[in-house]
Image (cartoon, grey):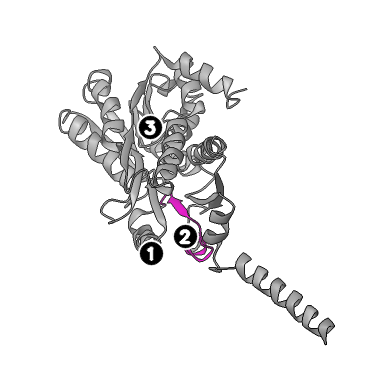
């Protein structure tokens, strides 16, 4: 009888111990017990050069916080996949979810669901405005385009013919950059004619396809006005060996390694640096402050720095040091 009681007590102790280990039943409880915050980063896509750079910098920034782990999910530039990744992160009980939207309005209800679930939500590159309880880390896309438009006023010749490459419709950065070009350049230079304008969705291959059509239809194109570097680089590939377009100007945004090389060699005119390094560090610092209770809600923008032939070498050197340029 004593032997049976002893066995019963041992089994009871084991069950109590197991119950304690699984209390709460969610990943957030486990992570808190271990002293580690679990953060999900839902990336728009890793096929885009800037988005891929941002993913790498997010991982690097997260390594500086020993009480934080970062898991990355690739949305593959597909709204359904981005939204599914957000839903899975909610279900898996992450302590915080950082979302890089593919289409802000398509992701809005899913980010609202993060807040409703009591999970910290941050939108970045581009922020989704007006979600109560969500934070954001971004750059000002209007300013990013304006710094290019300001110098293009004097650089683009009179009665010039230009082409325009846009990002995804409904994307905050794409829409605001295009608005800045309209207000800060086209309204001030009514002599300039747009001979081609298309949505290339940040994609280099799409930009190549549209530029091939525009070059066929137009004997003269004086400038490429692009809402990001990736599309600008694609358009430039089409005309790089064509002497008729040897003086073409080209403007982008992001300050990618490829763009800094093109500017440094005189192929591309200018870009605005949207530093994935700064963006990543700001995101991880922000999420850490929110997780530790240092702040309840944060909204911030990183700086918009113009890169031209005068300062491109400094950024080529920076990327070379980080192993992004061989």
Q: How crowded is mark 3: few (under 14 residues within 10 Å), some or many (20 or more)?
A: many
User: Mark 3 falls on what kind of element?
Assistant: strand
The alpha-carbon separation of the residues under discs 1 and 3 comes to 31 Å
Query: Quick one: label 2 or label 3, which is nearer the N terminus?
Result: 2
Relative vertical location of residue 17 with respect to residue 68 in this rendering, above or below: below
Q: Residue at x 33, y 28 (%)?
A: 304
| Quarter of the image with the C terminus in it | top right
**Looking at the image, which is closer to me, 232 or 210?**
232
| Residue 25 picture location, percent across and down | 56, 69
Q: Which residue is drawn at 29% across and 56% down?
A: 131
Which image quarter: residue 125?
A: top left
- Given the current orientation, which residue lies at the most extreme front position? 2
Q: Residue at x 33, y 43 (%)?
A: 173
Q: Are marks 2 and 1 in contact (CB under 8 Å)?
A: yes
Q: Residue at x 47, y 60 (%)?
A: 86
- Given the current orientation, which residue lies at the most extreme top position? 310
The circle on residue 86 is 2
Query: Quick one: label 2 or label 1, which is nearer the N terminus?
Result: 2
| Residue 240 picture location, percent across and down | 49, 25
In the visual, does 317 lie left or right of 167? right
172 in the magenta segment:
no
Query: Quick one: label 1 or label 3, which is nearer the N terminus?
Result: 1
Residue, disc 1: 113
Q: Are marks 1 and 3 in contact (CB under 8 Å)?
A: no
Residue segment shown in magenta: 85-101
């Amino acid at each position: 009888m004593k032997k049976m009681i002893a066995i019963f007590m041992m089994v009871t102790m084991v069950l109590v111990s197991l119950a304690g280990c699984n209390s709460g039943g969610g990943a957030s409880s486990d992570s808190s017990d271990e002293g580690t915050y679990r953060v999900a980063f839902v990336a728009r896509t890793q096929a885009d050069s800037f988005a891929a750079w941002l993913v790498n910098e997010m991982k690097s920034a997260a390594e500086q916080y020993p009480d934080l782990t970062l898991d990355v999910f690739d949305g593959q530039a597909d709204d359904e996949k981005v939204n599914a990744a957000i839903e899975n992160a909610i279900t898996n009980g992450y302590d915080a979810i950082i979302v890089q939207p593919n289409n802000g309005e398509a992701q809005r209800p899913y980010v609202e669901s993060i807040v409703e679930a009591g999970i910290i939500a941050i939108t970045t590159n581009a922020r989704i405005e007006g979600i109560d309880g969500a934070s954001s880390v971004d750059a000002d896309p209007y300013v990013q385009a304006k710094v290019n438009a300001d110098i293009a006023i004097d650089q683009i010749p009179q009665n010039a013919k230009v082409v325009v490459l846009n990002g995804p419709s409904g994307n905050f950065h794409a829409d605001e950059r295009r608005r800045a070009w309209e207000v800060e350049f086209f309204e001030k230079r009514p002599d300039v004619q747009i001979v081609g304008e298309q949505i290339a969705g940040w994609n280099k291959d799409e930009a190549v396809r549209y530029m091939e059509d525009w070059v066929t239809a137009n004997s003269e194109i004086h400038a490429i006005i692009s809402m990001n570097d990736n599309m600008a680089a694609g358009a430039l590939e089409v005309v790089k060996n064509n002497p008729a377009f040897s003086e073409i100007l080209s403007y982008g945004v992001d300050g990618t390694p490829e763009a800094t090389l093109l500017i440094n060699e005189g192929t591309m005119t200018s870009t605005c640096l949207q530093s994935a390094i700064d963006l990543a560090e700001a995101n991880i610092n922000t999420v850490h402050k929110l997780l530790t209770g240092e702040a309840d809600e944060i909204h911030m923008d990183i700086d918009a720095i113009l890169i031209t032939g005068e300062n491109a070498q400094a950024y080529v050197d920076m990327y070379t040091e980080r192993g992004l340029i061989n």
